[in-house]
Image (cartoon, rainbow, N blue to C red):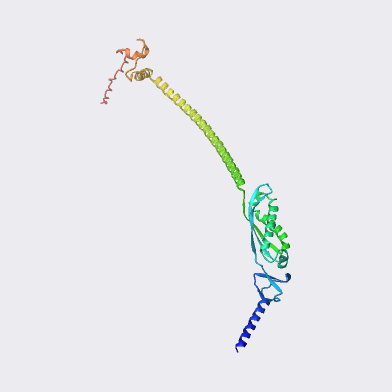
Amino acid sequence: MRGSTIAAVAAAFVVALLASSVLFTVEQTEQVLITQFGEPVRVITDPGLHVKLPLLQTVISFDRRLLDYEVPPEEVILGDQRRLIVDSFARFRIVDPLRYYQAVGPTEDGIRARLNSVVSSALRRVLGNEQLLNVLSSQRGRIMGLIRDQANQEMHNFGVTVEDVRLRRADLPEENTQAVLSRMKSERERIATQARAEGAEASARIRANADRERTVLLAQARASAEKLRGEGEAASIAIYADAFERDKPFFKTWRTLQAYKEAFGAGNSRLVMTPGDDFLNLLSHRPTVADAPAPAEPSFAVPLPTVPPK
């Protein structure tokens, strides 16, 4: 009984060993290449349980998912002879395990060195025909498409398809960065100087227009004032003339008294004149009764009452 159990266990172990060497599983994320004595036999892309010859055939698995590869940063000369440090990465997929195995080998690391040189060459060729503004503008998508197509064309012989190439960063070298910053600063200063000059010109033009309008307004105001002053003086002269014509002696006396008031009103005026000067006529002349105008004789005539007839 004990011997039969041991035999059954040994048989089960042998069966399990044979099954593990004959049967293998292909995952959904894998594709398998079967080799026999190092020579490719067949490619399996369908997931599930499969069979191989034990001890004679070897299963080599390749990832069928999208793989990433980061290209080391490198300096590239653009079409306008400007230098640019480009940091990029590529996404690729193994589509032909047989060709991949024949060109590279059973591991994925072998393709990365080849992918580095291919992507770098395509990057230099495409960027060598482009301007800096194109790389930094919306045309970057078109440029990355050209790089991807050229890299994909070369990597097709390795059983690999390059799905995408992206420029992660595009920086100028340090010395070029300083030069560009200096040029940008100079350009901004030039624009600021031009704006200040235009502002000063506009300010001078506005001030000149304002001064001209001010001069015109003042001249018009002076002309109006002189005209009004002349009209007022003419009216004043007409009034004085009319008053003088009405009563010449009184007007002459009143004007002389006004002159006395202005001359002697302060109390400290000194005039040097001859005694017979007309200006002192009212001060030196004593009016007599004969000089005074004769008063009008009163009328004492009283009307007599009318006696009615009898």
**Identity of the residue drawn at 64% across and 50% down:** 84
Furthest residue to the bottom? Answer: 1
Which of 3 and 241 lies nearest the eye of the viewer? 3
Instruction: Indicate the quadrant where residue 56 lies.
Output: bottom right
Q: Is residue 42 visible?
A: no
**Identity of the residue drawn at 67% across and 59% down:** 113
Residue 310 vertical position relative to residue 290 in the rendered view, above or below: below
Image coords of residue 216 (percent x, y): 52, 31
Q: Quadrant of the C terminus?
A: top left
Residue 195 vertical position relative to residue 241 in the rendered view, above or below: below
Instruction: Indicate the quadrant where residue 4 lies.
Output: bottom right
Image coords of residue 69 (percent x, y): 64, 60
Which of 142 and 203 lies nearest the eye of the viewer? 142
Which of 47 and 290 lies nearest the eye of the viewer? 47
**Taking 48 as reference, is 274 left or right?**
left
Which of 211 and 222 lies nearest the eye of the viewer? 211
Image coords of residue 46 (percent x, y): 68, 73
**Taking 218 as reference, is 84 left or right?**
right
**Identity of the residue drawn at 64% across and 62% down:** 68
Image coords of residue 272 (percent x, y): 36, 12
Residue 69 vertical position relative to residue 20 in the rendered view, above or below: above
Residue 266 vertical position relative to residue 79 in the rendered view, above or below: above
Q: Quadrant of the N terminus?
A: bottom right
